[in-house]
Every structure is written in C-alpha cells, then in structure tokens.
Amino acid sequence: MIANAVTGSTQVPSDAYRWMQLIIGVICMAMIANLQYGWTYFVSPMAKAQAWDIASVQVAFSIFVALETWLTPLQGWIVDTLGPRRGPKLMVAAGGILVAAGWLINAWAGSLEMLYLGAAVSGVGAGGIYATCVGNAVKWFPDRRGLAVGITAAGFGAGAAVTVIPIQMMIASWGYADTFFWFALGQGGIIFVLAWLLRSPLPGEVSNTSTIKVLQSKSSSTPVQMLRSPVFWLLYVMFVLVSASGLMVAAQIALIAKDYGVAQTVVLFAATTLIVSGVIDNLANGGARPFFGWVSDQIGREYTMAIAFSAGGLAYWLLGTAGTTPWTFIICAALIFFTWGEIFSLFPSTCTDMFGPKYATTNTSLLYTAKGLSAFVVPLANVLKGYAGGWHAVFAVAAIMNFLVVALALFVVRPMRLSISASQSNENRAVGQAAE
C-alpha cells in the first residue's frame, strides 16, 4: 500500500502500478537473456581463437546455468527476508553488477579456468535477477499468474532476439572479446538503474479474485513444508526432463546447423539460416511463455503441459528426421523453442498455485534449481551424438523425455492436486462448522 503523507492513510496501488512492476521485471530479464541464448554465437570463435575444444568451452555454459539456478533459493530467501521494499531492489542491483562483471571476465579470459570463473559470476548475478522478477510476477498477479509469469519469462526467452544480428556482426567485425565487453557494460548498466524501481506487494495489496479458473491453495507453505511434499519432487523431475531436452538444442543450435550443412546458407534478404533461425527461435521461445501461461490460466496447468509437451516431443522428432534443409531446419527449430520456453511460466505458476504466494520467491526458486541439474545433460548430448554418429539419437531421447512428462502431468500430478484441493476444502468446511 502507498501511504498518504497528509492523512496517514494508505491506498491500494492502481492496476497500472503492478503492470509497471511487471514491465520493469521484463526489461531486466531481457538484459540477461544473452547470457544464455546468445552464448552459442561465441562458442566457435572462442574455441578457434584460444585453441580450446568445443566440449571444454561448453562446460562454461553448464557452470553458468547451474549457478544461475542452484543459488536462487538462497537469493529468493534473501529477497523474502529483506521484505517487499528492500529485497527486490538490492538483489537486482547486485545482479546487474555481477552479470556485467561476468562478461567482462569472459572478454579477458585467456584460459578455460578464467572462462569458467566468468560463467560462475554471471550465473550468480543472473539467478538473483531471475528469481526476483519471477517472484514479483507471481505475487502481484494471483488472478493472471500464468500470463504474468509468462510475460516476465518472455523477457528472458525473447530478449536476445533483437541482439542476435548485432552480436554476430560485432563478433565478425570486432571479435568476440570486444562484443563481450560492450554488451557487459550496456546490459549491466540498464539492470542496475531499473533495480531501484522494483518492489513486491505489501500484505493486503493484492488478493484473489473470482476470475481465477485454476486450482489454487488457500494457504501458503514454507519452503521446508514444500520440500516435504511428494508432489513438489514430482514437479522437479518433470522440470528436469523437459528443461534438459530444450537446453541440449539451445546450447548446440549453431553446431547442429553446421553439422547439417545449412548454417551459412543464405535464405532471406542475405541472411543465413543460422541468423534467421536465431531471430525466430528467440521470438518463439519468448512468445511461448505468455501464450501458454495465458492458456493455463483458462484450462489449467496440467492440460496445458500435455498440449505443449506433446507438440514438443513431435518437434524433436521432426528436427531429427526432416530438419536437414535450410527452411525445414528453421521451422523445426522454431517449433522446439515454442514448445519448450513455456516451462518457465507453467512450472512457477503451478508451484505458487500449490504452495501459496507468501514464500513464492523462495519456493519457485527451489523448483527452478531443476534447470541447473538439467544443464549437465548438455555435454552428454555431444557424447551421445559422437557415439551414435549423428544428432538423431539425441532428438529421439529428447522426444521421449517430453512424452513421459505429458503422462506424468495428466495421470499423476493432476489427480494428486485434485485430492489435495478436496482435502483442504473438507478441512475448511469442518473448521467453519466447528465455529458455528
């Protein structure tokens, strides 16, 4: 609530105010998008310039994703502990400094150890920003939780789309080191400035409304209580499976295009397959998050998961069997990104629906650590590809992962959630009757 200096009264912020908070979060997320989705364009130039092998360079990507995720529960707890006014500001400001420092280290790295340090520093910073912005979204929008988290996550998924061409042009003209340097200053600076405008809602500023169409818990669970719940660990396994399949493609898309012999084929307005695919993939990845988030607000999280991940399994299969020409590669890759990006809206929304908003920054961060675990599958994809002699086996495994998650969402998670909701309703009814 906003205090009135004259009367001492408080007033609930306008709807425009919470949308302003959401927009600030989206911009901050867009500023860290290149740390993950722009990485693929630096891999080959770094490996060539430094005489490093690709697999060793990709370890840095795994380190980044791991620290971007595994420390978020601590960062989320710090945000929740510092309170709605100080927590978001301080965490995002510190994150802006760290992501800038991480890419500056990358620019000057002359050894793999230094590159890994840069990945670690930027990962810690990005994680703090990500956890805070997602936590803010689920807290400010209980009535449109899927959409709000989807829009926020879209900043991370699609934020790199506008810089795909500039990054590749800068690398070609100035070299990868200068590109790291200037993007570090620009991205970090914008985040640091915007951080001071962020805050979370105070108690009573937002409330559930009659427009909610999905199952939501009537109470909030502490992180410890959530970790004791079997359904949380089921969600965790599902997150790992789907996240791993998408990260294998996100980190390797340039290498896959090169192996298919389509990377440098000019397809549109003098742009190559890789450039066109890079733009479309980031737009698809970002667009999936608010779209499927909105769908899940209407029909439920589990049904939306079933639709998205079924299409995702099909997309992996298509890329492995039909993606060897420029345009089929572009289309199949875009479909993969469109059916993968929504995990970053569906899973946080589901988590907060189940365990409540009070500790949402910490709780959604605990679930988000599944992405860090899945990151270590990325180098294994190269091993499987080498053993099988091609990418087909990798895509087959990814498709199976997605189909398994569909089955778990429909036939395990949803029945469990319905049972929990019925139990809560019975308990509330019993309490009400006792009070009478």
Image (cartoon, rainbow, N blue to C red):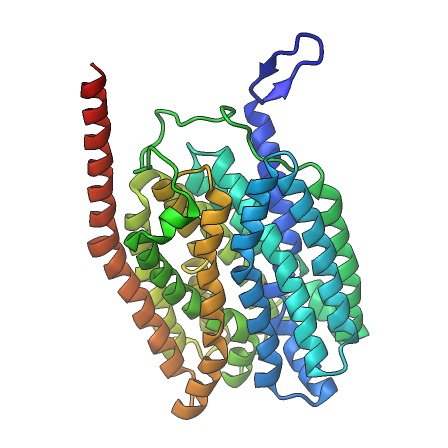
Quadrant in which residue 21 is drawn: top right
Whether residue 235 is visible, yes or no, is: yes
Q: Position of residue 184 (x, y in %)?
A: 75, 61
Outermost residue, top side: 7
Give above or below for 63 relative to 343: below
Q: Residue at x 28, y 49 (%)?
A: 303
Residue toward you, 65 or 211: 65
Count of residue discs: 0
Residue toward you, 212 or 172: 212
Q: Quadrant of the C terminus?
A: top left
Taking 216 as reference, is 418 left or right? left
Q: Position of residue 313 (x, y in %)?
A: 33, 67
Give above or below for 178 relative to 420: below
Taking 219 as reference, is 5 left or right? right
Quadrant in which residue 35 is drawn: bottom right
Q: Residue at x 68, y 72 (%)?
A: 117
Q: Position of residue 71 (x, y in %)?
A: 55, 59
Whether residue 161 is visible, yes or no, is: no
Q: Residue at x 34, y 76 (%)?
A: 397
Q: Quadrant of the N terminus?
A: top right
Taking 380 as reference, is 177 left or right? right
Q: Position of residue 336 (x, y in %)?
A: 43, 65
Residue toward you, 110 or 74: 74
Quadrant in which residue 407 is drawn: bottom left
Taking 216 as reference, is 128 left or right? right
